[in-house]
Amino acid sequence: MDDDRNPDHREPETKEPEEPEEPDNLRLVHLLRAVTVEFGLRQADFAARNGMHPTDVRALICLLDAARAAEPATAGLLGARLGLNSAGTTAVIDRLERLGHVARIRDDHDRRRILLRVEPAAIRLGREFFGPLIDGVLQVLDSFDPAERETVRRFLTATHTVFTSEPRP
């Protein structure tokens, strides 16, 4: 049987449909996610180098944030911020206290209440590790004018509100 097709004839190439370009806003969300993933990896590195669990590092951050906001740092506050039950919170505090990173101190205003304080040595340890990263971010921010920094602040504040207002699963 004769094949009247041209042996040199090739089927026209079909191009894969191009993915639609990602919307600008979604690119920003993905960029924010990439930054948070990288920050989480750096926290895990810091934890591993210093004999801590990643939750311990998050606990230190929570306690430092509370101190900056002049909030009394109690076990209850720490547990709520980390999403831990009381046994888990106590385990984290015990680990950090054993490592010399946190001290339990009596509240001067209510002697029944125990407050948590990050020790100066832990702050120095964190500065040694995270200081160059923080300095790099500060240099980036220095290149922005005040209006741009305010826009970044508004975006990050609103984004933080979205995450903190959504109940955790």
Image (spheres, grey):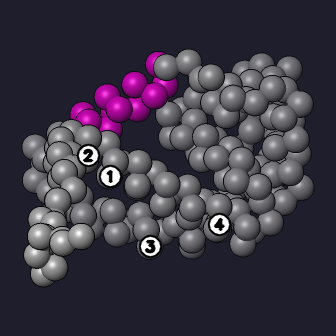
Secondary structure, mark 4, is helix
Q: CA distance from mark 1 to mark 3?
A: 21 Å
Q: Position of residue 120 (x, y in %)?
A: 67, 59
Q: CA distance from mark 4 to mark 2?
A: 27 Å
Look at label 4 and name its amino acid: Phe
The residue indicated by pointer 1 is 31
- Eye-nearest disc, 4 or 3: 4
Look at label 3 and name its amino acid: Pro
In the rendered structure, which disc, 2 or 3, sits on the residue that comes first in sequence? Answer: 2
Q: 157 and 108: which one is in front?
A: 157
Secondary structure, mark 1, is helix
Q: Give the residues drawn in magenta, as a range.
A: 152-165
Q: CA distance from mark 1 to mark 2?
A: 5 Å
Dominant secondary structure (helix, strand or loop) of the stretch shown in magenta: helix
Q: 10 and 106: which one is in front?
A: 10
In the rendered structure, which disc, 4 or 2, sits on the residue that comes first in sequence? Answer: 2
| Mark 4 vs 2: CB contact within 8 A | no
Q: Which mark is residue 28?
A: 2
Look at label 2 and name its amino acid: Leu
In the rendered structure, which disc, 1 or 3, sits on the residue that comes first in sequence? Answer: 1
Q: Is residue 161 above or below residue 60?
A: above
Secondary structure, mark 2, is helix
